[in-house]
Image (cartoon, helix red, strand yellow):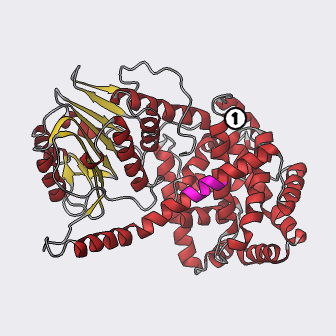
Amino acid sequence: MNSEDMGLVRAYAAGQSEAAFATLVSRHGGLVYSAALRQLGDAHLAQDVTQAVFVILSRKASSLSPETILSGWLYRTTRFACADVLRRERRRQRREEEAHMEAITEQNTHDPAWLQLSPVLDEAMARLRDHDRDALVLRFFENKSMKEVAESLRLDERAAQKRVQRALEKLRGLFARRGLSLSVAVIASTVAANSVSAAPAPVIAFATSAGAAQATTPSANAIVQGALRAMVWAKLKFSFAVGAAMLMVGAVATLAVAQLANQPEPVPLTRAATSGPIIPGPGALIIVGLIASDAPEQIQALAADTKKNLVARGFEAGHVEILSGNVTREQILQKLHDLAGSVRGEFWLVLLGQTGRAPDGGPAFQVSGPRLTAADLKPALDAIPGQQYIFIGTGNAGGFLSPLLGDRRTVLAATMVAGEPDQPRFLPDWVAQFTATPQAPFAEIAARAAADVSEYCKTSNIAQSEHAQLADPASGKILNAPFGVNVPPASNPTAGLK
């Protein structure tokens, strides 16, 4: 029972009870080890991760809320730890899928459905919201009864059943996007039968002793540090999703009060740079539209980093503006109209958020009120002189390429037209590559980011579900990665972002 788990956590936090901690490791060591082994395909690394996760538990025990679903928290922490290991292992070891599957315990290899699900299960689980993931971990990873699930989630059984069913449907949809067409019933039975096996006794012993003493081997300690950084980053992302609107409203209100005597109209949106006379020169507009609550990256932080990179590229800071908050289509088009009179030379437009469909079926960027369509953007961009670089950093973004392609306009889409992630991994990789080489050609930055995405998918043994494309003005064609660019090998600057 989860209440018993949290009682043990509190007992350990209050008095460093080794018996309480040993019980927690005994109960959940198999869950952590199995998830780590599935993601890493290496028993020794899985042992280090298991040790690291329970060290993190020992350090975080006093700060965990009594409402925490401990098994869900441990599963998420395992994911963070494994991601850190994969980043550090990427350049020196490439795992083949066959080797990965050989590492999975022998009793699972006879199940064809499990052979399909195992390489992508944890990646798909990571894309679920916490309450959905907790429900699935309790029901199918720990094989708790529906009554026990309901008690842990503080729901009645009917509501718990609905939550589990909805979470399964979401998981099935994520698998379908990776080309796995399995029924909800098959997914449920397969995960319940295969997802957790007993951890070897030495793993339990190491985790218990390391957690109780908060001492680790050097390799496990490196994992602890990397996972803790990732957990802080994830917490910041979530906190932003909750508090961004309030912060932006406060910023707008402060600015409005300060300018009340000279500007009777309220400031309509949050700006990263104050308005004022602009000397003609290169310019950029970064727009943060509506953001999904389960976005895997902190979009506002990526927008701010993009501005820093453009400044490092040689743009005047006052010529690079970020529009965010409850930004509307009309405000965006007005800003583009204003820029037509002030931009000379290079112009960048970066759209971050989500893409949907306009009433006519064309692509549309999601903002407050009516969506911003490709048909809206084209005449506004045509009025801005100079060479243009457009990045649509959203899911399902490829539909913008053909309508916006022009003889002086390069357009990059993070994903293809449809069926690819709402919040693509390509976006943080693009920002990281731009940060590493801000003076590099636009297509080269894109090609390096696309290579990072492919490398991540290969290393993680998952099907690549997103594919960036680039509309090239020189050839008039839409190109797939590497966009005609010969990308030399380079160290991966995205280590802190995955």
- At horizontal 56% and vertical 29% (from top left) the residue drawn is 491
Disc 1: which residue: 100
CA neighbours of label 1 inside 10 A, class few (<14), some (14 to 19), many (20+)? some
User: How far across and down, in percent of the image, does residue 12 sit?
Assistant: 82, 73
- At horizontal 40% and vertical 43% (from top left) the residue drawn is 420
Which amino acid does the dot numbered 1 rest on?
His
Quadrant (top left/top right/bottom left/bottom right) for the N terminus: bottom right
Dominant secondary structure of the residues highlighted in magenta in the image: helix
* Closest to the observer, 281 or 390: 281
Residue 384, quarter of the rendered image: top left
Q: Is residue 26 above or below residue 119?
A: below
Q: Is residue 302 left or right of residue 35?
A: left
* Closest to the observer, 15 or 420: 15
- At horizontal 59% and vertical 52% (from top left) the residue drawn is 187
Q: Is 232 part of what is drawn in magenta?
A: yes
Which span is picked out in magenta? 228-233
Q: Is residue 37 above or below residue 32?
A: above
Residue 146 visible in the snapshot: yes
* Closest to the observer, 463 or 325: 325
User: How far across and down, in percent of the image, does residue 361 sit?
Assistant: 20, 47
- At horizontal 43% and vertical 45% (from top left) the residue drawn is 424
User: How far across and down, in percent of the image, does residue 66 sit?
Assistant: 67, 78
Quadrant (top left/top right/bottom left/bottom right) for the C terminus: top right
Q: Is residue 143 left or right of residue 325?
A: right
Residue 470, quarter of the rendered image: top left
Q: Is 293 part of what is drawn in magenta?
A: no
User: How far across and down, in percent of the image, does residue 204 sit?
Assistant: 86, 55
Residue 422 visible in the snapshot: no
